[in-house]
Amino acid sequence: MFTGIIEEKGKVLRTEPDKLHIRAQKVLEGTKVGDSIAVNGVCLTVTALDGSLFTADVMPETMQRSSLGALRSGSGVNLERAMAADGRFGGHIVSGHIDGTGTVENIVKDGNAVRCRIRTQQEITRGIVEKGSVAIDGISLTVTMVQSERFEVSVIPHTLKETILGEKRIGSVVNLENDIIGKYVERLLFSTQKETQGMAQKETVLTREFLLRAGF
């Protein structure tokens, strides 16, 4: 479980088809092999440690379904350790299991902040609400606008400086994770609706057998 508050920017030392080797400092404090670190919002397991370097195995599906497959030697990455039980919950509940990717569609200066518009699939935007939270490359951000295939967030200077979001350009691909509570609510409502519809259909369908049993 993560909070979406990025602890540091790491740097990819090298990549392999099924591994990432990342240089970091802060997130390695107290970290052991087997611990979880979110890399650009994707929960990965530390498989090796060597000083200021850690290695994580990445499944081919994860490489294909996230932006991790586009990482190269020298790429910057957002890093966050799994939340400690006694830590502050500064962002929102982030699982590290992304829902998909989006593309930066527009970046506009807005006073001391920057408005960033992301284009993505309706399957993702239907789970996003204005003033709600969304994780972009693992960063917990507040949604300022949402439409059928795009949404917008406003990013403060501190976030731009401390994460790789400030390095994004129009056309950049980002990992997206919707608020997990919203996903549970949507699932519950969908299941309840299907069950109710099924009961209604059973009650309203007339068959020959039903009429015979009723004496007709």
Image (spheres, rainbow, N blue to C red):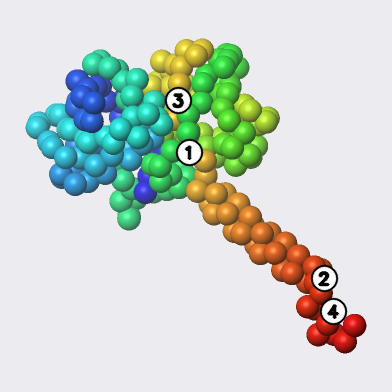
In the displayed structure image, the side of residue 24 where residue 137 appears, left or right? right
From the top left corner, tell me how far across and down residue 208 is, in percent. 81, 74
Crowd around label 4: few <14 · some 14–19 · many ≥20 (10 Å): few
* Disc number lying in front (1 or 2): 2
Viewer-closest of 156 and 23: 23
Work out whether 180 lies above or below 25. Answer: below
What amino acid type is highlighted by mark number 2? Leu
Q: Are marks 3 and 2 in contact (CB under 8 Å)?
A: no
Image position, residue 91 (x, y; %): 46, 42
Whole-angstrom CA distance, mark 4 to mark 1, is: 49 Å
Q: Is residue 66 left or right of residue 34?
A: right
Residue at the outermost left position: 50
Q: Is residue 198 left or right of residue 44?
A: right
Q: Which residue is mark 1?
A: 99
Q: Which residue position holds label 3?
A: 174
Frontmost of labels 4 and 1 is: 4
Residues packed near mark 1 inside 10 Å, few (<14), some (14 to 19) or many (20 plus): some
Q: Are marks 1 and 2 in contact (CB under 8 Å)?
A: no
Disc 2 to disc 4, C-alpha distance: 7 Å
Q: How far is the residue under mark 4 from the one under mark 3?
A: 59 Å
SS label for mark 3: strand
